[in-house]
Image (cartoon, rainbow, N blue to C red):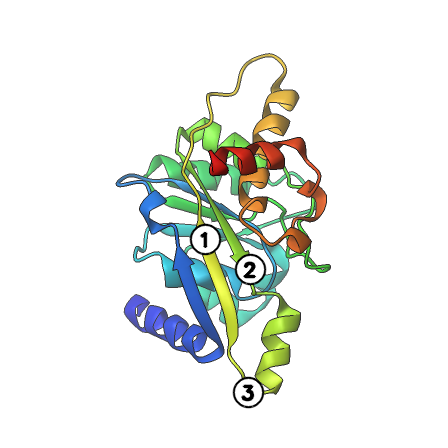
Amino acid sequence: MRNFIRALIRFVINLVTDVEISGREHLPPKGGFVVATNHLGILDAALAYYALDQWDLFVPVAEKWEESAILRWLGKHLNFIFVDRFHPDLKAMREMIRRMEDGQTLVIAPEGTRARDEKMAEAKPGVAYLAAKSGFPVLPVSLSGTEDRIIFGNLKRLRRSRVHVTGGPAFSIPPVPKENREEFLQHWTDEIMCRIAVMLPEHNRGHYADHPRIQQLLNESRS
């Protein structure tokens, strides 16, 4: 069944988009890791299964989608975890930690929901906490061209949308300290998001567009 679903995902994505993937050389060679990505449209989650040739992925998905019988069925085969986005979901957090301890790779959008205005929103600290807790490296990935407006607009014109998936260098987050936890998690959340934002077109950077870390990263890439 998984092979069928993967083939179906690839068929649909190839039908509606022309995907360019870069940065595969940054994939950690072995073991689990955290894929942190911006979230522009409904195709984003499927792109993880398209771009990564592995099945030990799991993806947190908003709890509202659990009401759909089709998505519940897909979730069983694609390792979805349905998460309450508006309240602390300790059950989901424990399940994510358990799966990471088993070596599974987490694919997550730190913003928590897709960008309705097509710009990055301020991220939640959960991804930084999970990466620090597990010791997994974080692989920042930028997605551009997956905006629902673009995808559906091109579909109406029977055109394929040009989508870019770009992976940046992986990096690790140290363990969470006993003191100044909030400042620690905020710092590393900003680091994750700035590393994603710097790979995006400027108009998609949103909340992080003027963050000083963006210019530092741009300078590092030029040196």
Helix, strand, or loop for circle 3?
loop
The x and y percentages for residue 190 are 61, 34
Q: Which mark is residue 166?
A: 1
From this viewpoint, is residue 75 visible? no
Of the numbered discs 1 and 3, the one sitting upstream in the chain is: 3
Relative depth, front residue between 24 and 176: 24
From this viewpoint, is residue 191 visible? yes
Picture layout, residue 101 above or below residue 66? above
Helix, strand, or loop for circle 1?
strand
Residue at numbered disc 3: 158
Which residue: 38% across, 72% down? 10
Amino acid residing under circle 1? Thr
Residue reaching furthest left? 30
The x and y percentages for residue 54 are 30, 55
3D distance between C-alphas at marks 2 and 3: 20 Å
Residue 180: name its quadrant. Answer: top right
Residue at numbered disc 2: 144
Helix, strand, or loop for circle 2?
strand
Q: Are marks 2 and 1 in contact (CB under 8 Å)?
A: yes
The x and y percentages for residue 32 are 34, 40
3D distance between C-alphas at marks 1 and 3: 26 Å
Amino acid residing under circle 2? Ser
Of the numbered discs 2 and 3, the one sitting upstream in the chain is: 2
Quadrant of the image for the N terminus?
A: bottom left
Q: Is residue 148 left or right of residue 49?
A: right
Of the numbered discs 2 and 1, the one sitting upstream in the chain is: 2
Relative depth, front residue between 212 and 187: 212
Residue 134: name its quadrant. Answer: top left
